[in-house]
Image (spheres, grey):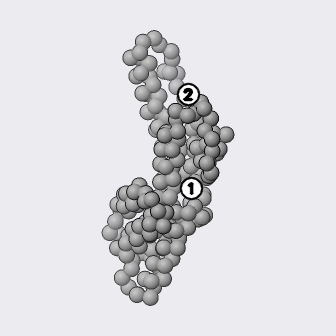
Amino acid sequence: GFVDNILFATHAVAIPEILAMDVRAIRAVRECTRLAVTGAALQWMLTTTTTTTMTTMTPQDTGAALVSCLAQRETSQELFQQRVQEVIVTLAKNETMHQDDNNDKKLEASLRHRTKRILNGDDPVWNLLEKRSRNVFRDMVVWKEHDPSWIMQTGIATRSRQQQQHQQRFETEAKKRFRSSGF
């Protein structure tokens, strides 16, 4: 339904009229999810490919570098891929590429190849994380709060406060489910 055929559509789709006002929001969710899946797959690839433990940069530092790079889309897919590959290679060089020039070149070629596969959605880890994100979205689309404090009351201020509290509980639950899915 909504998650597979609209939210995660892999081709252009005609948005039903009832969702026409939500096209920007749907695009934002797609982009945010793509960024999360791609960033997580690249982070996993980087930490499993390097031969030593990442010591000079924390996962938050490498994650911030990846997010910054991934968020700056270029008009050309090729330029975008090259820039992401450079960031990945630079992060790896900071950690492990100091010992053997021959091994460094092999590692760099491997990182560039795997990065391109991830960016093209042709990587098993990327596919697994993308599938998990779809499952979380499917679950959250039908999520119902089991909170007895959610009762009908009159007044705009009460309703607004309840909606904010509901939104916070929804976001907390979604974050919990994403974390348990490997993000």
> Residue 13's image quarter?
top right
Given residues 102 and 24, the one toward you in this image is: 24
The residue to which callout 2 is attached is 146
The residue to which callout 1 is attached is 129
Q: Secondary structure at mark 1?
A: helix
Given residues 137 and 146, the one toward you in this image is: 137
The residue drawn where x is 39% and y is 57% is 72
Q: Around disc 2, counting alpha carbons within 10 Å, would you say few (fewer than 14), some (14 to 19), or many (20 or more)?
A: few
The residue drawn where x is 40% and y is 87% is 101
Q: Around disc 1, counting alpha carbons within 10 Å, would you say few (fewer than 14), some (14 to 19), or many (20 or more)?
A: many
> Residue 130's image quarter?
bottom right
Q: Position of residue 172 (x, y in %)?
A: 46, 38
Residue 115 position (above or below residue 183): below
Q: Secondary structure at mark 2?
A: loop
Q: Amino acid at mark 1?
A: Leu
Q: Position of residue 165 (x, y in %)?
A: 43, 27
What is the C-alpha distance between the residues marked 1 and 2? 28 Å
The residue drawn where x is 56% and y is 63% is 120
